[in-house]
Image: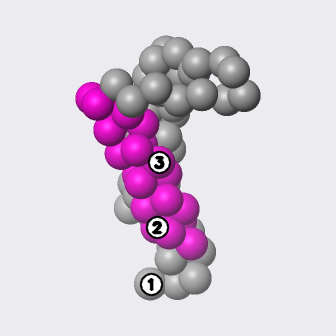
Amino acid sequence: MNSKNLWLRIAGTIFGVVAIIHLLRIITGIPVLISSLSLPMLVNWMGLGAAGFLCFWLWRLPLCHKV
């Protein structure tokens, strides 16, 4: 595995962890406060979709293209 593939896998893993954290907040319903504002669940749904897509894409990219 060359260094480009390694860094793609590391970035994909980080995005996967972020997606799992978003999913856990959706499941548990823990409120997140920024200053005095409550973060709506819609933000977590969008974060889950974006982070999940990036995780999938970064893990698949070395398989599709020889980087």
Disc number at residue 1? 1
Gap between marks 3 and 2 measured at Cα: 14 Å
Q: Given this view, does label 1 or label 2 mark the residue nearer the observer?
A: 2
Q: Is residue 38 above or below residue 4?
A: above
Category of crowding for the residue at label 1, using alpha-carbon neighbours closer than 10 angstroms: few (below 14), some (14–19), many (at least 20): few
Q: Callout 1, which amino acid?
A: Met
Quarter assignment of residue 62? bottom left
Secondary structure state at the residue bearing disc 1:
loop
Q: Where is residue 15? Give x, y as percent.
A: 49, 51
Q: Name the side, left or right, on which 34 lies relative to 16.
A: right
Dot 3 or dot 1: first in sequence order is 1
Quarter assignment of residue 23? top left
Name the residue rendered at 44%, 84% in the picture: 1
Quadrant of the image for the C terminus?
bottom right
Disc number at residue 9? 2
Bounds of the magenta segment: 7-28
Name the residue rendered at 46%, 26% in the picture: 31
| Residue 66 vs residue 20, the one in the foreground | 20
Q: Is residue 9 magenta?
A: yes
Q: Is residue 57 visible?
A: no
Residue at numbered disc 3: 18
Prevailing secondary structure of the magenta residues: helix
Category of crowding for the residue at label 2, using alpha-carbon neighbours closer than 10 angstroms: few (below 14), some (14–19), many (at least 20): some
